Amino acid sequence: MAEGSPTKQPERPEYIRIKFDLPRPYNWSTGRYLGKLYAEAKENKKLVANRCPKCKEIKVHAPTPVCPKCKVDMGWDWVELPQTGTVFQYTYQVYPLFDPHLGRTFADPHPPAIILLDNGVFLRHRLEETDTKKLREGMRVQAVWEEDYEKRGQGFQDILYFRTIEE
Amino acid sequence: MAGRVAIVGVGQTHHTTRRNDVNMAEMVGEAVRAALADAQLSIKDIEAFIFSNMEAFEGVLLPDHGMVAEVGAVGKPGLKVTGGGTTGSEAVGEGCHMISAGLYDITMVVSWQKHDCGDATAGISAAAVPTFAKGMVTGAVSEFAKQALSYMKESGAKEEHAAMVRLKADRGACRNPYSHLKLGLGSIDEVLQSPYLVWPIRLYDFCPQSCGACVIILASEKRAKKIHKKPVWVADFVVVHQEPFRAGSFGDPTGTETYSQHVACERLYKRNGITNVRKQVDLAEIYEPSTWEEMSLYEHFYFCEKNEGWKLIEKGVTDIEGDFPVNCSGGVIASNPIGATPVIRIAEAALQIRGDAGEHQATRDIKTAIATALGGPNWTAMFLLKRSL
């Protein structure tokens, strides 16, 4: 092959392609720290995070045994996060993307947003409001939980979305 | 680095949406042959292999196992790197480490992604730390949409500037025989007519999912000069990790986080006496998943002052003909076989230093170049390449 020349697309029929779409069930362990977040969400509809003993930063994405910044053992200091906040930044899908969890495209997706919770912690989640004309930064929002106990147990997904509230 | 390392051979396939004519191993084999031809080496000369691929994206576990025969790696040592967007840079880094440590004289970095087998967005969304990232990550597009919104707000850049980045990339891509998207765009308006994917990212603002492979052959100082008449020296490289899935994965909408780019630059520039990047470095090949991110990265790599990245685009400073060309190849928004993408950055920068880039060769003489990679939750890798040490 000469230097600098591209490989040519050969003109020949496509080879056989095999489609593989069997469901592959996996079981992931949440672990001690993330497990605490999962348990509080499922059992008590609470959103919790852990706090570094040194820098006091609250880790919600996700709770870890070691502070990423200080590199010290986090210990077991938990904080319950407020479930209200303001929309810090949002975006929205225009062209529906494929959702691998559902195996279909989003027809009417909830806008992904960064929410500044009332204690100053930033949370990644999504908004209930799908009318993009009604979205604005600074909007007050509140968490809406999955009410069915059996369906909870999905960690952050136990909160369905954040709903616009009037105050 | 203790022992000096040079790039003595590069080879790549053309990058495209589908390669139904070959399987993964056959596609990779094309790039291996091209790199061996460039280095004028035989596969028997290669002492160790480093494989670079994001395996979740094709749904294949241990894809390297399925291609050792085609690659010529049977009976030889090797390792595989799977590290998100920076995979390729880390693989080239490992190839350098092996030589620098005195283990081998010649190593080969084999990188690829065959996106027609699977879906990268599915891989990112489903497989990225499923217990806490599931449903929190809608692929890369909405993450870069957040980055774009922050950049727009802070810097004053307009959608027209993002369009100019695509026009610049497209001019390079149309001259590059290997690149994937050759759109032949003529005006800002044409770019602005492309539909939004996730506000404010348009179809033409974002990188494609490509099939393609890229191979780099590295050699020790002792062997490099005998192998290639124009070896390109790896002067230095850094890799900086970042915390997973913070509020803003790319960019920092919250104003509270450390940029991995800044940490990487601080180390690389300080170690190499670089105080003015645009004066001391001649060219950059950067990993820009979106047009907006390219402008932002200019600032974070200190090519310019804060909030002035879009001005470099406006003035044409980073064009092929400009004072400081960036991504003459068309960059990531033109071709993106993820496991190979950072390796292509390094290979293209090396070709520019050799003067062998062909039609997309920069106008000015390139003696020193930077090649970067970005990935995961904003990890940064940076390579500094030189014609002579």
Image: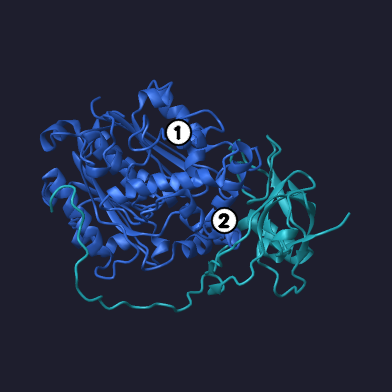
Determine crowd level at label 1: few under 14, some 14-19, many 20+ residues with C-alpha closer than 10 A: few
In the image, is B49 to the left or to the right of B284?
Answer: left
Quarter of the view holding residue A160: bottom right
In the image, is B326 to the left or to the right of B259?
Answer: left
* Kind of residue at badge 1: Lys
Q: Secondary structure at mark 2?
A: helix
B292 shown above or below B25: above
Determine crowd level at label 2: few under 14, some 14-19, many 20+ residues with C-alpha closer than 10 A: many
Residue under the point 46% across and 44% down: B164
Q: Nearer the viewer, mark 2 or mark 1?
A: 1
Q: Colour of chain B?
A: blue
Q: Earlier in the sequence, mark 2 or mark 1?
A: 2
Identify the colour scheme used: by chain
Q: Secondary structure at mark 1?
A: helix
* Kind of residue at badge 2: Ser
Place of residue B288 in the rendered image (x, y in percent of width and height, measured from the top left): 44, 46
Mark 1 = which residue?
A: B315
* Of B333 and B370, the residue lying toward us: B333
Residue under the point 37% across and 44% down: B90
* Of B109 and B333, the residue lying toward us: B333
Residue under the point 14% across and 32% down: B225
Question: Is the C-beta separation of discs 2 and 1 under 8 Å?
Answer: no
B240 shown above or below A163: above
Q: Which mark is residue A114?
A: none
Q: Say which chain tag 2 marks.
A: B
Place of residue B380 in the rendered image (x, y in percent of width and height, measured from the top left): 45, 40
Examine the rendering and report whether any part of residue B91 can be seen. no
Q: Colour of chain A?
A: cyan
Examine the rendering and report whether any part of residue B234 can be seen. yes
Q: Which mark is residue B142?
A: 2
Place of residue B238 in the rendered image (x, y in percent of width and height, measured from the top left): 40, 35
In this view, the residue farthest toward the right is A167
